[in-house]
Amino acid sequence: MKLTNEGLRDTAAWQKAEVALPRYDREQMIRATEKDPVWVHFGAGNIFRGFIAGLQQRLLDKGLTDRGIIAAETWDGEIIDRIYVPYDSLTLMVSLRPDGGTDREVIASLAGGLKASSTEEKDWGELKRIFEAPSLQMVSFTITEKGYALRDLKGEYFPAVQANLKDGPEKARHAMAIVTALMRHRYVSGAAPVALVSMDNCSHNGEKLRGAVTEIAAAWVKAGFADEGFLGWLSDETKVSFPWTMIDKITPRPADSVTKSLADLGIEDMTPIQTEKHTYIAPFVNAEIPQYLVVEDRFPNGRPKLEEAGVYMTDRDTVNRTERMKVTTCLNPLHTALAVYGCLLGYTLIADEMKDADLKRLVERIGYTEGLPVVTDPGILRPEDFLKEVLEKRLPNPFMPDTPQRIACDTSQKVPIRFGETIKSRLKDGSADVLEGIPLAIAAWLRYLLGVDDKGEAMPVSPDPMVPELQAALANVRFGDPDSAGDALSPILANEVIFGTNLLDTPLKEKIESAFREMLLPGGVRKSLQRI
């Protein structure tokens, strides 16, 4: 069996392998999508293929739409060449049950994949054609939080952004410049309304997207690449909206065990690849079953019936409360704490960490004791129930091949929200003294940046845009010598960009510095956990 249009014709073989197939005419869907596209998604990776694309599949299966999604990749075009094209933009979704079983389904709702870059002449022309279409209702994104960033910590534009502002829309390279250039093309082609919907796992994601797009647009207007009307159109949310969302589904890197199981079933060519940009991806996606998507219902040109696919369609305040519940308390802080401690203690699976009594107590404390009391109930999901599911079912799932090393990526970009919001809430109500687990997690992250584990052996540090700067600040700190820490942490703890507040003026400063010094001794990382 092959995951291609031709391969799907052997329905009996797929049914024997217990793989669910689409219940609609895919060729007809592709033709309808090409004629009148309704949905483009930027970010062609696992969370999109394993979650977002599945939503449209549900609607197609129910006959609630006849259009699919066009995927666009701004960062790693090799994904399109090696994962989309050879497999006719099909994905094999493998859902991992806690009992060790799997549910398998072919996701066929993608009408195609494009490389979103002005250097890709054919694909760029196709994207322009799509953005001209009055039928286009939604442009969504899963490009990670750093995809929206235009400036470094000094407030200066990244070189790619600076070049894009200078060279204009026709030479767009940065993700936000690419989107702004395509929106400018939509504006001059009739200015039909549309919604730009960030589905990335970050706080106030719609606001981040809106800020980046309008900042580039304003710079282009000033430089003469666009007229004032373009910025006015982008700024009018009755014409162009930027709904906020909350997304939750863990989609780890492809697991060897899943690759083998698919091969045993007779499904060919499922081996994962690693691109030159170090994207590790496969023709299949393996992920947990629980998933949540909460979307602010503001779509000036209409939208798919997402509520029929299990999406919570609501108002901005509810999205904000739900996102705050998840990102600042009930999942993301626990993930980050497990990630940095897991790396330091030699773990390679999150599920194994949940068998460690010390680590389990740490995340229970961060969730139940330190975070939950300052969370506002979003109304559509009970925080206590959500947190319980995370701690008792999702994180301990032994068949989820999720690694602390993956989650440790870009931690500097996550800390201000995952820990900073609870810190600010506790400081505001005068209860910061209760915080013990969060200061430990911050100290463990800073200790992790030394690239030395709890035994004193070298370990890799996951990619993060701030690693060079932070490691330079810690350059004189030595494992085995707590006194070498000196005041090295002070400028880091004072950085409000990282923590959301200046921690030097808080009771957390001494807790973090004391734990960090303790962790510089062999076995100190483990001892720091046992103290609480």
Image (cartoon, rainbow, N blue to C red):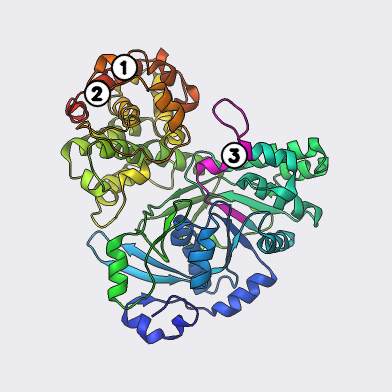
- State the residue position of label 2: 520
Query: Which of these two is toward me, 12 or 176?
Result: 176
Query: Which label number is shown at residue 109?
Result: none
The residue where tag 3 is placed is 207
**Position in image of residue 28 (x %, y %):** 60, 79
Q: Position of residue 439 (x, y in %)?
A: 32, 25
The residue stretch that appears in magenta: 139-160
In percent of width and height, residue 136 lies at 68, 61
Amino acid marked by disc 2:
Leu
Label located before the other in sequence (3 or 2)? 3
Where residue 519 sits, quadrant-wise, is top left
The residue drawn where x is 36% and y is 40% is: 408
Secondary element type, mark 2: loop
Which dot, 1 or 3, sits closer to the camera? Answer: 1
Left-right relation of 355 to 407: left
Circle 1 crowding by C-alpha within 10 Å: few under 14, some 14–19, many from 20: some
Q: Nearer the viewer, mark 3 or mark 2?
A: 2
Q: Secondary structure at mark 3?
A: helix
- Give the residue at x 69% y 45%: 237
Q: Please name the residue that numbered disc 1 is placed on.
A: 485
Using the numbered discs, state the Cα–Cα distance from disc 3 to disc 2 in whole angstroms: 40 Å
Quadrant containing the N terminus in the rendered view: bottom left
Which residue is found at the position 61% from the left and 36% from the top? 150
* Residue 307: percent from left, percent from top: 51, 59
- Give the mark, 2 or 1, whose residue is nearer the N terminus: 1
